[in-house]
Image: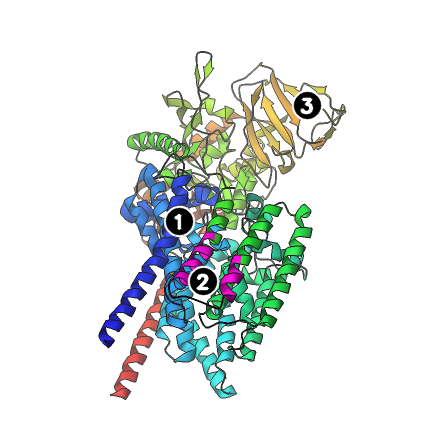
Amino acid sequence: MDKNRRRWHLSLRHLTLIGAFLVPVLIMTIYFAYRHMEPFGSSSLLTVDLGQQYIDFFAYMRRAILQDHSSFFYSFSNALGGEMLGTWAYYLLSPLNWILLFFSGTSLTIGVYFLTVIKYGLAGLSFAWLLLKLSKQTGGKVIAFATMYAMMGWIISNQLNIIWMDAPYLLPLVFYGLYLVINTGKWRTYVIWLTITLIINYYMAYMICLFMILMFIFMAVDKYINWQSLLRQAGRFAWTSIVSGLLAAFFLLPTWWSLSQSKVQYTVKGIAWKFEIFPPNIITKFFSGTFTYDQMQLGMANLFVGAIALLGALFYFTDSRVALRTRITAGIITVFFGLSVCFQPLDLLWHAGQFPVWYPYRFSFVIGFWLIWLAAQTLTNDFKPNWKAITSVLIILAVGILYSTLRLKSLKFLHMGQIWLGIFFIILALVLIIIPIKSKWIYPMLFFVVGTADVSINMVLSLNQMSYVPQSEYGVYTKALQGYVNQIQAKDSSFYRIDKTFMRTKGDALQTNFNGGGIFTSVLPKDTASFYGHIGSVDGAGSVDYTNGSLLTDALLSMKYHIGYNEIKSGAIDITNPLSPSSNRKDLSEYKVISHNERANVYKDESALPLGFVASSKILTLRDKSQDPTKFQGAWLSALTGNRLDKHIFTPQNFSKITFDNVQKQYKVTEATFRKTDKTKQASFTLYFKPETNDAYYLTMGPLMSSKNVTLSLNGKSIVQSAPYRHNVLVSVANHAKGKMQKLTFALQKKSLRLQNFTLYSLNNSEVKAAAEQLQVQPWKLTKHNNRLLSGTVVSKSAGQVLNTSIPYSKGWQVKVNGQKVKTYKTVGMFTAVKLPKGKSTVSFAYWPPLLNMGIIVSLLTLVGLIAESWIVKKKHK
C-alpha cells in the first residue's frame, strides 16, 4: 500500500510539473497563433529591441558556432570591428539559444517563437518545482501559482527582451540553493546554480545576487537560534557566493574588461536623493493591462501578479502561523522593494549605478517572485483568515482602488474598465481565500481557473498594445541584402568594408555577415561612439551607424563597396522598395557602378585604402578633437600623408540666395534662428547654391536639426537622415553638379528652428584621390585574414615609419613584427598603429580577450580547490 501511495504521489508530482510547464506554453502559443505570429501567420515576434538588435546577434551566434569560429572573440561586423566576448556574456550565453541553430536565414523568427514559449514554460516549471520542495501546495494550486509567476507583469512586458527571460527560471533554483545553505549547510546546489546564472547573464545575475542578500536576511531571521549560528550562516553564505563568482571568473573577468571600455564609463557619479515618481502611484501598476509602449521608455515598474497573489501576499502579514519576527522582516523587505521602484539611489543600486536606457526598473522580476512566494506560503488549504485580517486587507485594497480611481485623469495607461476588472478578480480571489470548504478537486480547479484567467487577460491587454515586424519585412529585406553581400564576396576575397544607404537595423552587418560600419549594442566602446561623432556619422551611447560617410572617410576606412538605394519606378506607378533608405549619399556617383538592379546599385571605390598602409609618423601625435567633421577629417588625412595642405581639403561655400514662406526673414545662416510668422500654419524657407566645380558638396548639421524639428528636401526630394544623433553630422548634397542650381528646403516642424552648426562645404575630389594613391603605394599586403588573425607583409622605406591601420585599438590585439612583439599606438582616439623597421616586414595581428587567461586560471584553481576539499572531507568521514 505504501509503495502504491508513493507511486501515486510521484506520478502526481510529475504531472504537476508537466502542467506547470505546458500551461504557460499553451496559453502563449494560442495567443501568438491568434496574432498570426510566425510560424502561424504573416507576422513575427520581432518588436523593439528584439527586432532591432537581438535578432542580429542571434544570426551572428549561429554563424560563429556553425561556420566562422574566428568571430567568436572578435568581429569586423561589429561596427568597424569590436570584441565579442562582452556581447556573448550579455546577449548570447543562454543554453536555450542553441535552439536557434536549427533555424537559418529568414526562418530564424520561428526559432525565436520556440525560444520564447520555452522560456515561459521553464519559468513555470522552475517555480512549481520550488513550491513542491518548500511549500504545502500541491496539484492544481501549484500549477496556478506557477502560471502566475511565468506570466507575471514583468515577464509579459519583457518578452521582447528575450535575453533577460532566463532570470525568471533561474531565480527559483538559486533561491532553493540558498535555502539549503541556511537550513542544511549543503552548499553545492547554491554554488552550481548561482555560477550558471552568473555565466548565462551577469546583468540579471547581479540583481539576483542583491535579492539573495535580502533573502538570506529573511531566512536567517526565520531560523534564528543565537548570534553564533547567525554568524556561521552569514560566513557560509558569503564564501559560497564568492566561490560562485570565482568559478565564473573565466567569463566575468574578460566581461568586466569589456564593460570598462563601454557601460562602466557611463556610470552615474553623482546621486540625487529624490523620488523618481510619487510613491503611491506604484499602486496603479497592480492593475491588469498597465503596460504600454510609453511605459516601456519612461514608465513605472511592471508589478502585476494577479489578484490571488496580491491578496495572498497581504494576508501573509496577518498569518499567525508565521513568527512575528519573520513577518516584520518580510515587511521591511517589502518596504525596501517599494522604495526601490521610486527612490533614485535604490534604483541606481539595482542597476549597478546606471540609469536604464528604456525598460525602467528591470529588477522588478524579483518583486514578482517575492509577492507570489509569500502568497504561496500563505494560501494553503489550512489557511483560515479571521475577520480582523480580512478587514485589514480590505481596507488596504479599498484605499488603493480609491487612490487609483482619483488618479485616472493623470495616468494614460489606466482607465476605469481596468479598475472594474481588478475589482472583479479581487472579489473572486477573496471568495476563494475565505471560503471555508476547500474540496479536493473543485477548489484547486477554481483556484487554477481564476488565477490563470487573471494573468492571461493581463497578457492579452498588454501585448495587444504592441506592434510587431511583419515576417515579410524581415524576410524580404534580409534576403535582398544577403544577395548583394554574396555577390560582392563571391568576386572579392580580400579584406574590405561595405557601406549601404539603406537599413533595417544598425546590426545588418552581423545579420548578413559582412564587414560594415554599424552596430546597436549595450557594450559599445565609448571610443567608437566618440570617433563616429568626430567624423560626422550617427553615434549614440549604445549605437553607431556609418550613414554619413564622405569620399574621404570611405577611402580611409576601407569602404571599398557601397550598395546604394534606388527609388523604384515602373512607368507612372511607384513600386515599393523593400530596402528602407537611411542616408543621402549623392557622392556615390563618384564611384564605378559594378552591378545594378531596380532596388539598388553596387559601387566600387578604387581609392579605398587597404586595412593597413605606411603613413607619416605624425599620425601618432595627432590629438585633434574638433567637433567639426570637416576639420577632423582634414587633420586626420594631413597627419597620415604628412602634407599640411590636406588639412584644408574641405572648403566652406556660400549660399547664393534664400526665400521664405511664412518665416520671418533672416539672412544670416549659420547659428541663425528662423521663426514662423503665423504659428498656426506650415512654414518653410529655401537656400540655393550653385556648385562651381564637380566636387562633392556636404552640409554639417547639429543635433537640433533632427527630423523632430525640421524636414529637409533637396530639389524636391526628401533628405533622409538616420537619427537620433548626438554630434554634428555630415550630409552629402551634391556631386558632379557644376553649374546646376541646388535648392535646399527646410520645413519647420515647430515654431522656430536654429540652424545649429550649419555650414556648406566642398571637398576636393581630386586631392582625395591623390592622397589615396600616395598612401596606397606601401600597403600591408594581407596573406591571411579572418576576424581574429591577420598577417601580411609591408615595405618601409626608412626606420620609424608607421603602419597605420583601421583596426580599432584594443589591448586584446597582440602585434608582432618579424616575429617580435611590438608596442601598439592608438591613432585618432580609435585605431591601431605600429612602428616599422626599414625594409620588408611581416606584420601579424592576433586577438585574445584581455583577462581571459587570468579568468581561466582563477576558475580552474577554484574548481581544483573544491574538488580537493570534497576529497578531504570524504576521507575524514571514512
Q: Which residues are magenta?
A: 428-453
> What distance separates the C-alpha of mark 3 from that of mark 2?
53 Å
Query: Can residue 124 be found in the magenta stretch?
Result: no
Looking at the picture, tell me which residue is in the foreground, 502 or 744: 502
Q: Residue at x 66, y 48 (%)?
A: 408
Q: Are marks 2 and 1 in contact (CB under 8 Å)?
A: no
- Residue furthest to the front: 437
Please tell me which of labels 2 and 1 falls first in the chain.
Answer: 1
Label 2 residue SS? helix
Q: Is residue 744 above or below residue 84?
A: above
In the displayed structure, would residue 758 be above or below residue 203?
above
Q: Quadrant of residue 437?
A: bottom left
Label 1 Cα crowd, 10 Å radius (few <14 / some 14-19 / many 20+): some
**87 to 519, vertically: above or below:** below
Estimate the x, y position of residue 243 in percent, counting from the top left. 40, 72
If the image is split into quadrants, where does the N terminus sit?
bottom left
The residue to which callout 1 is attached is 27
Q: Which residue is mark 2?
A: 205
Give the structural element (helix, strand or loop) at label 3: strand
Q: Residue at x 46, y 57 (%)?
A: 451
Asked whether disc 3 touches disc 1, contact meaning CB atoms under 8 Å apart, the reply is no
Question: Which mark sits nearer the N-terminus, 3 or 2?
Answer: 2
Quadrant where the C terminus is found in the figure: bottom left
Q: Residues within 10 Å of mark 3 (few under 14, many from 20)?
A: many
Three-letter code, disc 1: Ile
For the point 40% across and 28% down, the residue is: 606
Q: Using the image, tell me which numbered label, if any, was put on residue 684.
A: 3
